[in-house]
Each structure stands twice: as structure tokens, then as C-alpha cells.
Image (tube, rainbow, N blue to C red):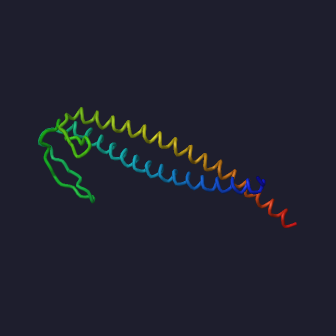
Amino acid sequence: MDPAKKVEDEFRRLSIEIRLLEETARTLQSRLNLVNTAIADMTYAHSTLEGLEEKKEGSELLIHVGGNSYIRAKLHEPDKVIVGMGAGVSIDKTLGDAKEIIKKRFEGLGETRKSLEQRFSQVAQKINEDQAMLEELAAELRKGKASQNV
């Protein structure tokens, strides 16, 4: 095979690989954003449950309903929390159990985030390596074309 053709084929292969890696990086970044949002939600839930420990039955609360709006409510059972378990299923738990569930979810999300960050870092490193190789191949191709014009 002609050496120039070999360089061109490698150039094309690296170009395609870089595009695929960049798409992978975008997907990983999107997943990281979702995990970070879930972590923020778990942090808010944990903080709210911590605050409930100090409340007694009949305490007045402000419940966030979205859009920077709240409603006033009275706490009926301070040691009971309804926890979503997934697939639209929620169950009654004690405050302590609910805090433990939130803690485990938070830890799981932290592990997921760490894994995604590591994968993102690996992909970014591979993109950088491929781009450096692509630049070398481009220089080689330019040099080859320049010597053909002589």
C-alpha cells in the first residue's frame, strides 16, 4: 500500500474516532449533570429531614410547592416520612429510616458521579492523544503534498 494512502486512511480513522469520542464526552457530561442534580436533591432532602428532627407535632411548617412559592402546614406525625421507592411506589418510614435511605442514595450517586468523572477523564485524554496524532498526520500529509508539487 502507498505510504501516503496509509497516512490518509489513518487520518480519516482518527477523525471519525475523535467525533465518536466527542459524542461520548457530551453524553457523559449530560449524565454527570443529571447525577449532580440528583445529588443536590438528596442534599436538600437530607437537610429537610434533619430539620424535622427538631420539630414537634403541631409545629407550623412552610412547604415549598415550586416557583418560589410555599404553603403553610402543621406537622401531624413528626417521626413519619413517606419515601418514594421508585416506579410510583411510596411507603411510610420512620424519620431515621428515611434519613438512612437518603444517605444510601446519596452515597450511590456519589459513586456513580466518581465513575462518570473517571470515564469522562479517560475519554478527554484519548481525544487529546488522538488530536495530537491527527496534527502529526496532517503535517505529514502537507509535507507530502508540498514535495509532490516540486
Dividing the picture into quadrants, the one containing residue 122 is top right
**Residue at 52% in and 43% down:** 119
Say which of 13 and 140 sits in front: 13
Where the C terminus falls, by quadrant?
A: bottom right
Q: Which residue lies furthest to the right in this view?
A: 150
**Residue at 22% in and 36% down:** 53
Q: Locate residue 122 relative to residue 58 in the image: left or right.
A: right
Q: Residue furthest bottom?
A: 149
Percent position of residue 4, x then y = 77, 56
Percent position of residue 79, x then y = 17, 35
Percent position of residue 65, x then y = 23, 55
Say which of 108 and 20 sits in front: 20
The answer to whether residue 44 is above or below residue 144 is: above
Percent position of residue 41, x then y = 33, 46
Q: Locate residue 22 relative to residue 66 in the image: left or right.
A: right
**Residue at 66% in and 57% down:** 12
The answer to whether residue 90 is above or below residue 27 is: above
Dividing the picture into quadrants, the one containing residue 98 is top left
The answer to whether residue 8 is above or below residue 41 is: below
The answer to whether residue 109 is above or below residue 12 is: above
Q: Count the marks: how many?
A: 0
**Residue at 38% in and 49% down:** 37
Say which of 1 and 73 sits in front: 1
Q: Locate residue 22 relative to residue 46 in the image: left or right.
A: right
Q: Which residue lies furthest to the front in this view?
A: 1
